[in-house]
Image: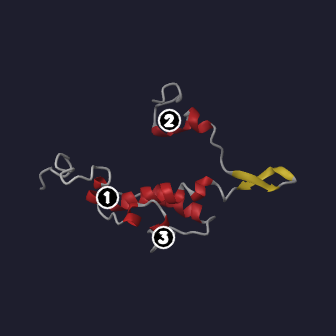
Amino acid sequence: MYDGQISDKSSLKRIFNTNIGYSRVTFPMVAKDPKVPNRVVLNKNARFFWEDVPYGLCILKDIGRIVGVATPNCTKQIVWHQKFMPVKYVDPSSGEFLPGALAKTGAPSAYGITNPEQLVATSLGQGKNSMSHDIYFNRPRL
């Protein structure tokens, strides 16, 4: 799929760092003073804040919470980004979501999904027997 676009496939980090598709994505910076355009500051109105946090990082952190997998790097990124946002999602001290914080995100909990079975079911057909052939739901319970 990405043949010819990635120059180093030795690790996930190198795949991202050497993917040509990401080379055109600039970090969101704006001139601090229009009269001095070479002095820049972080653009707090950029997509990285208003889309990637509530519809990326919060989703990943919430999925981790639902399936019981810690997501410390997602938490660190959310905490860092929210320093510049009027919206807060995570308590910096505990690393836990703040009450009501997920209501305006794409996080599964915002849609009433609270367990792995519900999470998996959202990607399966909605018919009466849609899960009858799924190995996850039909495996022997120990």
Crowding near pointer 1: few (<14 within 10 Å), some, many (20+)? few
Q: Quadrant of residue 96?
A: bottom left
Camera-nearest label, 3 or 2: 3
Q: Residue at x 54, y 69 (%)?
A: 88
Q: Which residue: 80% across, 52% down?
A: 39
Mark 1 or 3, nearer chain start = 1
Relative depth, front residue between 59 and 103: 103
Q: Spot the residue most to the right.
A: 35
Please report the residue visible at 51 percent of the width from the left and 36 percent of the height from the top: 14
Q: Is mark 3 on a helix, strand or loop?
A: helix
- Rendered image: mark on residue 101: 3
| Residue drawn at the location 13% of the way across and 55% of the way down | 141
Colour convention of the picture: secondary structure
Image spot of residue 125 (x, y percent)? 27, 49
Is mark 2 in CB contact (under 8 Å) with mark 1? no
Which residue bears the numbered disc 2?
Answer: 15
Residue type (three-letter) at the residue carrying disc 2: Ile
Q: How crowded is mark 2: few (under 14 residues within 10 Å), some or many (20 or more)?
A: some
Label 2 element class: helix
Split into 4 quadrants, where in the image is the C terminus?
A: bottom left
State the SS at label 1: helix
What is the CA distance from the residue labelled 1 to the residue labelled 3? 19 Å
- Residue picked out by circle 1: 67
Q: Quick one: label 2 or label 1, which is nearer the N terminus?
A: 2
- The three-letter code of the residue at mark 3 reads Ala
Marker disc for residue 90: none
- Identify the amino acid type marked 1: Val
Which label's residue is closer to the chain start, 3 or 2?
A: 2
Rendered location of residue 51, percent (x, y): 55, 56
C-alpha separation, residue under disc 2 versus residue under disc 1:
27 Å
